[in-house]
Image (tube, helix red, strand yellow):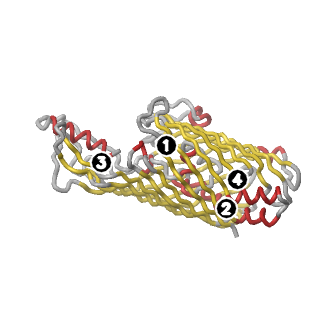
């Protein structure tokens, strides 16, 4: 995307070498904040980081989710290919774990996580309108490395809060200045670097527990949770970049909600089997705003009313027998190309727990509670009403081990 922008400027300069427009262009060099680095996120159109998540890569969306990873160790990986139908890809991986503890009289959890993501685009040759070679934009990539911590407190409501530090690097940037006319030096490429912080907070109202506080030991139980949350991402700490580029990463406030309902089968376990679970997920963000920007209640709670500043996300996710996950979502607003997403996932641990109930095998049920391997496939369709870009597939895995 940077390269396409530079290509446009170079082509313009080749046609108007003697024209000085009297202004320069400053763009943000960091692509990774805007490219999905979690297949789980892509499956729900990047909504749902304010609620239940399984992929520790989602600490890049809301570091508070790390509070939910204190029951063992999780390792995840992500690969997205053919972004915009081109040879452009993103990949990432994360590891997270933590401990259960108490804060005063309330149960609590503390989770830490480390995530890495990269976005890469191939080299290509710049030419003028006669097809003459001007220069080559070498292969480039963006990288992000994040370290975060999340704390969860279980009381009348569940509160999660977290923070992370991120190091971002954008390589092979056009460093000759982006004012017109452009001249190509022998080595016009440099790197941009930045350090930023993210903070996140969400609150879950366990409505089902309020209605039925007794634990489920047999028969059927019902779960109804409502979550709202806020994250401020891209809080600049330091940054440096070539002329024509912004040095600091762009600030991106985001907020969202989740409404989750489930039916549980009590099996004499502290963790009943969820026979079916349905979620409605929303999210909204205003890239470039300081703290809240143009976000509204309809953006955040319904994932609706996108405009030239507010990006909205909304999705539904259905989980059957803790084993099969089906997702569908929409992403639209601001200057981004509208997207529709869908995803399908399979959870080995959920399948083992389900088999344990159906076959009356407590050993399988226990094994599924301690071990899980999740695979998710997701696709984005850009501008669904007439996309020239095609679909963008992604693959993700999450391995979880509990003691």
Q: What percent of the width, then of the height, locates residue 302?
A: 61, 34
Nearer the observer, disc 1 or disc 4?
A: 4
Q: CA distance from mark 1 to mark 3?
A: 23 Å
Q: Are marks 2 and 4 in contact (CB under 8 Å)?
A: no
Q: Are marks 3 and 4 in contact (CB under 8 Å)?
A: no
Kindly identify the residue that appears in the image at 59 percent across and 50 percent down.
201
Label 2 SS: strand
**Residue denoted by label 4:** 323
Quadrant of residue 112 in the image?
bottom right
Mark nearer the N terminus (1 vs 4): 1
Density class for disc 1 (Cα within 10 Å; few <14, some 14-19, many ≥20) is some
Coordinates of residue 382 in the picture (x, y in percent): 47, 37
Secondary structure beneath dot 3 equals loop
> Which one is earlier in the sequence, the residue at label 2 or at label 4?
4
Among the two numbered marks 3 and 4 on one chain, the one whose residue lies closer to the N terminus: 3
Which one is in front in this view, the residue at disc 1 or the one at disc 3?
3
Per the model, the C-alpha gap separating discs 3 and 4 is 46 Å
Q: Label 2, label 4: how many angstroms apart (C-alpha)?
A: 10 Å
Spatial separation of the CA atoms under disc 2 and disc 3 = 44 Å
Disc marking residue 372: 2
Image quadrant where residue 358 sits: bottom right
- SS for callout 1: loop
Residue drawn at (36%, 55%), measured in percent from left and top? Answer: 141
Which residue is under mark 1?
291
Quadrant, the C terminus: bottom right
Disc 4 on helix, strand or loop? loop
- As drawn, 343 above or below 330: below
Binning the other alpha carbons within 10 Å of mark 4 as few (below 14), some (14 to 19) or many (20 upward) gives many
């Amino acid at each position: 995307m940077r390269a396409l922008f530079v290509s446009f400027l170079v082509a313009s300069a080749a046609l108007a070498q003697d024209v000085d427009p009297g202004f320069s262009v400053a763009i943000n060099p960091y692509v990774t904040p805007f490219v999905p680095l979690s297949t789980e996120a892509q499956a729900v159109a990047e909504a749902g980081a304010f609620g239940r998540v399984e992929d520790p890569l989602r600490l890049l969306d809301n570091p508070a989710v790390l509070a939910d990873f204190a029951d063992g160790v999780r390792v995840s990986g992500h690969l997205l290919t053919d972004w915009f139908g081109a040879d452009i890809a993103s990949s990432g991986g994360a590891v997270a774990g933590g401990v259960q503890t108490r804060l005063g009289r309330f149960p609590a959890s503390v989770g830490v996580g480390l995530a890495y993501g990269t976005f890469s685009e191939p080299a290509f040759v710049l030419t003028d309108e006669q097809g003459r070679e001007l220069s080559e934009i070498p292969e480039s990539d963006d990288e992000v490395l994040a370290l975060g911590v999340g704390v969860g407190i279980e009381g009348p409501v569940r509160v999660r809060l977290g923070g992370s530090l991120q190091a971002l690097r954008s390589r092979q940037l056009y460093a000759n200045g982006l004012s017109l006319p452009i001249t190509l030096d022998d080595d016009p490429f440099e790197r941009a670097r930045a350090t930023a912080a993210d903070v996140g907070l969400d609150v879950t109202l366990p409505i089902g527990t309020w209605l039925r506080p007794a634990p489920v030991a047999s028969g059927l139980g019902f779960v109804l949770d409502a979550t709202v949350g806020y994250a401020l991402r891209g809080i600049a700490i330091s940054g440096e970049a070539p002329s024509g580029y912004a040095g600091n990463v762009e600030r991106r406030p985001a907020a969202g909600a989740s409404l989750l309902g489930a039916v549980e089968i009590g099996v004499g376990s502290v963790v009943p089997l969820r026979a079916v679970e349905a979620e409605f997920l929303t999210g909204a963000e205003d890239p470039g705003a300081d703290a809240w920007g143009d976000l509204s209640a309809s953006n955040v709670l319904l994932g609706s009313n996108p405009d030239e500043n507010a990006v909205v996300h909304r999705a539904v996710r259905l989980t059957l027998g803790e084993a099969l996950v089906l997702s569908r979502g929409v992403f639209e607003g601001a200057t981004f190309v509208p997207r529709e997403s869908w995803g399908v996932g399979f959870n080995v641990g959920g399948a083992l727990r389900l088999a344990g109930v159906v076959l009356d095998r407590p050993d399988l049920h226990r094994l599924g509670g301690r071990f899980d391997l999740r695979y998710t496939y997701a696709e984005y369709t850009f501008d669904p009403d007439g996309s020239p870009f095609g679909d963008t597939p992604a693959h993700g895995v999450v391995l979880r081990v509990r003691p």
